[in-house]
Amino acid sequence: MKLIIFLILLICNIIKSQQYGPTWAQINSRPLPGWYDEVKFGIFIHFGIYSVPAFANDGYAEWYWYTLNNPSSDGGATQRYHEKEFGANFTYQDFVSQFNCRFFDSDEWASIIEKSGAKYVVLTSKHHEGYTLWKSEQSWNWNSVETGPGIDIVGELTKSVKNMGLHMGLYHSLFEWYNPLYVADAETGKNPKTQVYVDEILMKQLKDIVTTYEPELIWADGDWMQLSKYWKSTEFLSWLYSNSSVKDTVIVNDRWGSECRDKNGGYYTGSDNFNPYKIQSHKWENCATIGYSYGYDEFEKATDYQNVSELLVDFVTTISCGGNFLLDIGPDAQGTIPNNMVDRLLQIGSWLSINSESVYGSSPWRVQNETFNIWYTTNTTNGNVYAFVFELPDNGILKLSDPIGNHKTKATLLGLKSENGVTVSLPLESNKHGITLHVPLVAPQDYPPYVYVFKLTNVK
Ligand SMILES: *[C@@H]1O[C@H](CO)[C@@H](O)[C@H](O)[C@H]1NC(C)=O
Ligand SMILES: *[C@@H]1O[C@H](CO)[C@@H](O)[C@H](O)[C@H]1NC(C)=O
Ligand SMILES: *[C@@H]1O[C@H](CO)[C@@H](O)[C@H](O)[C@H]1NC(C)=O
Ligand SMILES: *[C@@H]1O[C@H](CO)[C@@H](O)[C@H](O)[C@H]1NC(C)=O
Ligand SMILES: *[C@@H]1O[C@H](CO)[C@@H](O)[C@H](O)[C@H]1NC(C)=O
């Protein structure tokens, strides 16, 4: 008996102290924490000094400082705009006084995000500009507590997001364009002889955000600048997975070195706005923008923004193929989430409130789509299949050729309002060539909005 207890304790101890050594083979062997695949939908937030000029030439406003200094990268548009609006002697750092965040209310942000149906948040703790949204000792003169608004933005938002029951994640740029320590390391090109920046800045900041804020997701970026050996990525991830307080729940992406994307780390991200429209063999994420830019660009027009139907098409095609959808918003320098972004989030939230069972916890089905307008997910526990239909046929006769039905097959349209409030099964014919559904021609206000989700039971 004593021996058995001893053995159980020993096994528990081994499980508890699971160590992942600093090699990609060991890092990649760690199973992804289950919460991430279940939640499907997150909100990305790009917020920093670039939110002040809020300008890009149909590109990334968060790259303002770089495009200002490298006019060839955008045909000089940023430089011309800057000189006209602020004068040639106005430096990028001067914008910090206008990064006032006077309307910033982290509870309000978290509440809007919660209403969108998103289950996780990823905030830029530091973008390539190096400005940190927390009081970083390694960035003592260039952070949001000691300069600018005087607010621990990472801390306040982390608290509000966790209070809402959502998962909090932090984006962190591995490099900084103009950090003198990085510039000195990188002087020798892609094979730096020194790692002063990594030892003195990067490692300390990454460990600081993990121990101080306990994020459940780290979204690394700037990977392409150097090999992961330079960034000491496996050393950091070994510590994160083995020794940090979030080791059991934390998940990371794949941007940990120029050789890592779609290969090493946690889930894969591909390129920005990545959507392959094909099932992938490894968990992946589509980090999507509503317009062109991640950071706020006040010059994007209403017509530059995708509407809710377009966003839901991107969302549905992503989850059908096993991805998560991380939709980006860019608050302005006052700390306000622009109204048109809030609108999109609330519209997605109202759609999700009707169709949640087809999304959260779902899995890709054996077929992802049968045309561009019909996509699928399934609940692997009860075998229900969900068909996402972007356009209903005018005559109400909807043919699905992939699901194989039998005499027990039933179909409902999620959110279809009936006269007495009872969910109605739709009349259908089913044979080995698929299922034909007869969708009632009711008044438009009785249809659920944007994307129609049919729930099929007893199909193969
Ligand atoms: C910019 O600074 C330089 C050097 O201090 C000065 O000569 C120049 O007049 C300034 N330009 C403007 C537009 O203020
Ligand atoms: C993790 O903690 C163990 C035990 O304290 C230690 O031996 C190991 O070196 C640590 N690993 C890392 C990557 O910090
Ligand atoms: C979104 O735009 C498309 C055209 O690009 C249009 O067909 C669709 O009806 C629009 N959806 C909404 C909800 O406005
Ligand atoms: C999947 O089916 C199981 C069994 O019926 C059910 O308990 C679970 O809630 C379903 N999942 C979702 C996300 O609805
Ligand atoms: C599924 O959608 C993709 C992306 O539009 C398309 O290329 C493919 O042909 C579709 N599959 C079928 C079977 O229609």
Image (tube, rainbow, N blue to C red):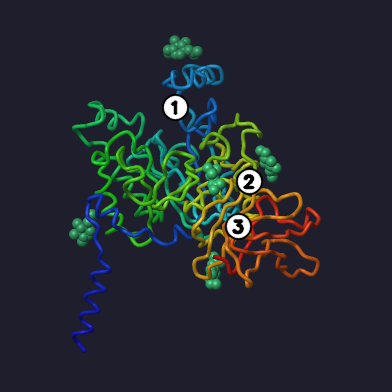
* Image quarter hosting the C terminus: bottom right
Mark number for residue 65?
1
SS category of the residue bearing label 2: helix
Q: Is residue 7 above or below residue 432?
A: below
Q: Are marks 1 and 2 in contact (CB under 8 Å)?
A: no
Mark 3, other Cα within 10 Å: few <14 / some 14–19 / many ≥20: many
- The image position of residue 108, as x and y in percent, is 59, 51
Mark 2, other Cα within 10 Å: few <14 / some 14–19 / many ≥20: many
Instruction: Identify the amino acid type marked 2.
Output: Arg
Q: Is mark 1 within 8 Å of ligand 1?
A: no
Residue sitting nearer the eye, 183 or 26: 26
Mark 1, other Cα within 10 Å: few <14 / some 14–19 / many ≥20: many
Residue sitting nearer the eye, 299 or 3: 3
* Image quarter hosting the N terminus: bottom left
Whichever of callouts 1 and 3 sits on the residue coming sooner in the sequence is 1
Q: Is residue 125 above or below residue 51?
A: below
Q: For mark 2, what is the residue? A: 344
Q: For mark 3, what is the residue? A: 387
Instruction: Identify the amino acid type marked 1.
Output: Trp
SS category of the residue bearing label 3: strand
- The image position of residue 417, as x and y in percent, is 75, 62
Residue sitting nearer the eye, 159 or 224: 224
SS category of the residue bearing label 1: helix
Residue sitting nearer the eye, 346 or 130: 346
Spatial CA span between label 1 and label 3:
45 Å
